Image (spheres, rainbow, N blue to C red):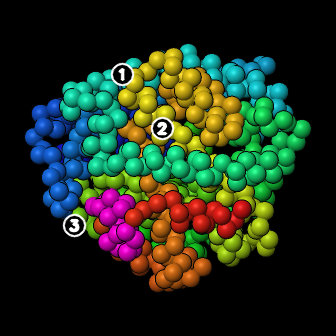
Amino acid sequence: MRAEIDTFLEALERAEWLALSGRSDAAGVEAIYDRHAALFEPEAFHAVEPPEGDSRDDLQRAHLREFLAEGIEGHRTRDLRDAYLAAEATAVVEVDGERIPYRRMPVRIRQEPERAVRVTLDKARLKVVEKELNPISLETTLRKHAVAQELLDTDYDDYCARLSGVDFDALESRTAALLAETADPYDDLLAHFGRRALPGLDLREMWTHDLARMFHGEEFALLFPGEAMVPGIERMVSAMGLDLTAGGRIELDIEERQSKTPRAFCATVRVPEEIKLVLQPYGGHDDWSTFLHELGHALHFANVDPAQPLEFRRMGDNGVTEGWAMTFDHLMMLPSFLRRVVGISDPETYLRFAAFRELAALRRYSAKLSYERSLHREGPGPARADEYATRLSDATRARTPRQLWIEDVDPHFYCVRYLRAWMFAGTVHAALRDRYDEDWFLNPRSGPFLAELWALGQEGRVEDLARDRLGVESLGFEPLMDMIDERI
Ligand SMILES: [Zn+2]
């Protein structure tokens, strides 16, 4: 079965890479699932004994069970996945005679300085979400809820928590505390940057498209040139004692192609032998940050020990790989990185902005966790749309459209992975600073230290890595919050 799973994952990743990098038109997810349908029968899931403890063998079975359950969900919704991707790819928004592909809308909206135009664009985008995408997402959610009932006879919240081995209640009590503790500093930052980026707007009238405009950070665009990005980061990775291509296992694709997605991404076609890092360097802080994030994923997977079993190479707690990705994108919050790698002589204002942006994302995901738990326990309905708008608006202070209640939901509680990655990346930064100083990213000993941890793949969960490899007994948001506090 393991060999077949490896083949399936390779086909899926390769198809996605071909489609998103603009080399082919259709992803063909349905056909790939159909070729490997036997993997996604409930019998295959039930044949794997549930884990009983924390031994290596238990972890292997826990990862495999979670993968197979998610595979059954994927298989049962494969037609909807293709329908969603097709609807998203072909939808066109028409505003005042301008025809804009739906996928370009987020970029178009945040680049628009005129608020009235932004309002019209956002309305038109939400119409597509409500008419074309929400019916597909709703049906997808209902089918996934049915899988949870069928496999573990429980609701989707409890099912995901049990399969992942993560205590959702404990995490939610941490995010609730974080929302309360960071409310005042967040409001101060919002007032400060709101005045700069959205002059004349009463911030009580702020919508999510205004927030997107603010985080676009136009005033910082020239500080982060596109053409300097790859060479600058390549020099940094070499200084760490590593190689940007991991000995040729990472293929960097910076070529321009018509239908290539504007956002950088990493495809793990074969782990660790064939990792694709795809991007179009435009420049700007968001571009640098996304490249660093995807590079963290690529270096992690390209350095996994090939002798590790499939369950540790390709499955497991995705909080781990998201944590390595964030370890790299959080470099944007270090003054020494901005000075020495990006070449910004006075990074103070940007640093405060970067910390604000991180805090906003953290607050948004904290609210998403509580909302998604409610959605997956109570089930979909109009009350959920109200709850979504209330929770997200409270956390971000930006009015959030209720039409996004089923669109803005991470598959299989991926928000949990991000939240745990935030805690883990904060801990990793503290460990690297203790061992190799403030400028650890230019220290030739930091790379081999990280590579040794990457070699494990996703064998342990984030708390196991923190405890066993970094000597940190309990993971929390404190190290990350210290880093943010220093900047604001
Ligand atoms: Zn990521």
Question: Disc number at residue 214?
Answer: none
Residue 278 point in image, percent of width and height: 52, 52
Look at 40% across and 71% down and name the residue there. 472
Of labels 1 and 2, earlier in sequence is 1
Q: Camera-side residue: 183 or 95?
A: 183
Q: Amino acid at mark 3?
A: Ala
Taking the image as shown, residue 248 lies to the left or right of residue 69, namely right
Residue 302 point in image, percent of width and height: 38, 64
**Which residue is under mark 2?**
370
Numbered disc in front, either 3 or 2: 2
Q: Amino acid at mark 1?
A: Leu
Look at 48% across and 37% down and name the residue there. 370
Residue 200 point in image, percent of width and height: 89, 38
Question: Disc number at residue 307?
Answer: 3
Determine if the magenta segment contains residue 479: no
Q: Secondary structure at mark 1?
A: helix
Q: Secondary structure at mark 2?
A: helix
Q: Amino acid at mark 2?
A: Ser
Q: CA distance from mark 3 to mark 2?
A: 39 Å
Taking the image as shown, residue 473 lies to the left or right of residue 426, namely left
**Which residue is under mark 1?**
142
Task: Report the span colored magenta.
Answer: 458-473
Is residue 377 depicted above or below 331 in this figure? above
Of labels 3 and 1, earlier in sequence is 1
Numbered disc in front, either 3 or 1: 1
Q: CA distance from mark 3 to mark 1?
A: 39 Å
Of labels 3 and 2, earlier in sequence is 3
